[in-house]
Image (tube, rainbow, N blue to C red):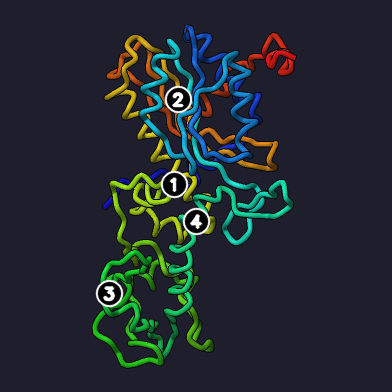
Amino acid sequence: MPIAPPPESFLDQTPMNLMELYGRMRTLTDKAGFEGTLPAIWQCSDESQSIKKALFGYINNCPTFNLGRVGALLDPSRLATAAHHGKDFVILGGSHIGAEESDGIGYIERVHGQHVPCCGMLGKVLDDYLRAYRRAAQLIKISQEENIIKVEVPYKYLFAKPTTETVRIQIKLNSLVEGEALGEGTLGKVYRLHSDIVDNHPELLPSKEKEPQPIERLLKPELFSFKKNLNPESHEPKTMIEVSVFDFLPEIVASPFPHRRLCNINTWRQFHRIASFITDDFDGSNSNIFVLAGLTIDHTLRHNTFIPQFGFWMEHGRALEARYFGPSEINSLLAEQPIYKPPVTFLEYAGL
C-alpha cells in the first residue's frame, strides 16, 4: 500500500496573484536574513510558464535558475550546480493546469487559437489510464433483482493477461463481488455485489425498475489496479512521470477532476524529491533554503495564479532541523507576510 497523498480538499487552497505571492516570499526570506539569494524554479517547459519565471527573477533581483524539465519534473543535478551560483536559495515549483475545465481535463488556448489540454505532458500520461478506467466503468453493469444487487463483470476483466506496454485495468474481484457467480450474463459472469459497497454507497445503487446500468462512480480506486510494463531506469520524461505516480493512478482516474489530481500528486512527489535531495545530498553548507511547491493555474498564456501547497525551510544548512509545511500551514505563513514591492519597475529591471 503506497503512502497516500494529501486529500484533494487539503490541496484546494485559494489561488494567489503571482506578484502578491512573490512579494510575500521575498518579505519572508528577507526577514530570515537570506543573502546572495539565487531564485530557482522547477516547472514544465511550457510557454505559459515563462512570464511566471521572469517575474520570480524580478522580485528577487536576480535571473531565475532552471531546475525543471517538461511535465514539471525536477532535475536534482541542476540543484547541485546551483550551489555554485548563489549563497542562499528560494525555490518555487510544481505542476500547472489550464483554468478551463472540461470533462475533468484542464484546457488553455494556445497562440494559434486551439484549445488544448494543459499541462499537455500530464494529459498524455493520463490519457490511456483514464480511457481504460472509463471503459471499464461503462462495461461493468449493476442491477437489482429480488432485493439482490448484482454485478456483471465482462470476461475481459476476469481472465488474467500478461503485463505488456499497453495499459490494462485489473479488477480486484474479491473486493467487487461476494461469493461464487450466480450465472452467465451477456458479456461475462453475474455475481452478487459486495455487501461493503452496497452498505457504503446506497445512493449509487440501481432501483428495481431500471435495466442493468454501468457501474460508473461505484468503481472506486480500491476495486482495481493498473498493469503496464514501465522501465524505472528510463530518462524519457513521460515514463519518468508514469513511474513516479503509477501507484496512485487508480485514485487519479476515479477523481471527478483527474487531470488536476494528477497535477497535485505530481507536485507532491517532486516536492518530497527536492526536500530529500536538500537534506541528504545538497552541497551547500550554511545555506538558507526556502522551497514553495504548488499548483499553477494557467488562465491564459500570459496570466497565471498559484496555489501554495507545500513548504520546506532549512536554515544555515541544518538539515536535521529543517521544517516542513502542509497546505494550511504554508498558506498561513505566507498570509502573515507584508507584500514586498521592488524599488524599480520591471522594464527598469530589464534594462529599458
First of labels 1, 2 by sequence position:
1
Q: Quadrant of residue 284?
A: top left
Rendered view: 215 above or below 127 = below
First of labels 4, 1 by sequence position:
1
Q: Circle 2: is it few (<14), some (14-19), or many (20+) Cα within 10 Å?
A: many
First of labels 4, 3 by sequence position:
4
Name the residue tied to disc 2.
291
Separation of disc 3 and disc 1 at Cα? 32 Å
First of labels 2, 3 by sequence position:
3
Three-letter amino acid code at disc 1? Pro
Instruction: Indicate the position of residue 301 as horizontal and vertical percent values.
Output: 68, 41
Q: Circle 4: is it few (<14), some (14-19), or many (20+) Cα within 10 Å?
A: few
Say which of marks 2 and 3 sits in front: 3
Front-most of residues 181 and 244: 244
Three-letter amino acid code at disc 2? Val
Instruction: Indicate the position of residue 275 as horizontal and vertical percent values.
Output: 36, 28
Which residue is at a point 66% across and 49% down the rendered structure image?
A: 108
Q: Quadrant of residue 21?
A: top right
Rendered view: 99 above or below 217 = above
Q: Circle 1: is it few (<14), some (14-19), or many (20+) Cα within 10 Å?
A: few
Separation of disc 1 and disc 2 at Cα? 21 Å
| Local secondary structure at mark 4 | helix
Separation of disc 2 and disc 3 at Cα? 44 Å
Name the residue tied to disc 1.
7
Name the residue tied to disc 4.
124
Which residue is at a point 44% across and 28% down the rendered structure image?
A: 311
Marks 3 and 1 close (CB-CB < 8 Å): no
